[in-house]
Image (cartoon, rainbow, N blue to C red):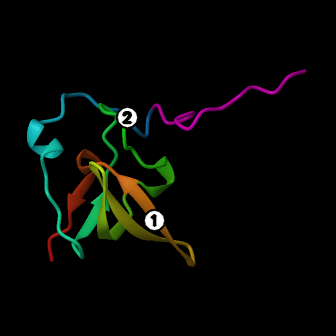
Amino acid sequence: MVTRSHGVRWGTKKKLRKHSKTPITRYLQAFEEGDTVVILPDSASPQGMPFPRFKGMAGKVKGRRGDAYVVSVMDGNKMKTLAVKPQHIKRLEK
């Protein structure tokens, strides 16, 4: 029997549920290098969305990569870098 293939968003129906459109201001957010941000995936726009494991994690903006921001987060004992579009991150107030 052939095993079923699972895509990146497999099993995320409840995790990534979205009930409304995303405001345009979320797409136009600007972040500076060193800002602390929280990863909150927006299922209305799948482009530039990080893997669901990183939902709710806080990290620091390290720079830009095209339209996306490079965010470094701690995953267990490892530092990982993600390229995340601005609609999927939110600035963490100090």
Q: Residue 87: percent from the left, percent from the top?
A: 24, 45
- The answer for how far apart the CA atoms under marks 2 and 1 are is 19 Å
Residue 46: give its label: 2
Q: Residue 37: percent from the left, percent from the top?
A: 26, 65
Q: Is residue 54 left or right of residue 78?
A: left
- Of residues 16 and 8, the one nearer the viewer is 8
Image quarter (top left, top right, bottom left or bottom right) of the N terminus: top right
Q: Residue 7: percent from the left, percent from the top?
A: 60, 33
Image quarter (top left, top right, bottom left or bottom right) of the C terminus: bottom left
- 4 part of magenta stretch: yes
Q: Residue at x 81, y 27 (%)?
A: 3
- Of residues 52 and 72, the one nearer the viewer is 72
- 35 part of magenta stretch: no
Which image quadrant for residue 62?
Answer: bottom left
Q: Secondary structure at mark 1?
A: strand
Which image quadrant for residue 14?
Answer: top left
Instruction: First in sequence, mark 2 or 1: give its number.
Output: 2
Disc 1 crowd, CA 10 A, few/some/many (<14, 14-19, 20+): some
List the single residue furthest toward the right: 1
Q: Is residue 55 above or below residue 79?
A: above
Q: Residue at x 34, y 46 (%)?
A: 41
* Badge 2 amino acid: Pro
Q: Main secondary structure of the magenta part?
A: loop
Disc 2 crowd, CA 10 A, few/some/many (<14, 14-19, 20+): few
Q: Is residue 75 above or below residue 22?
A: below
* Badge 1 amino acid: Thr
Label 1, on which residue? 81
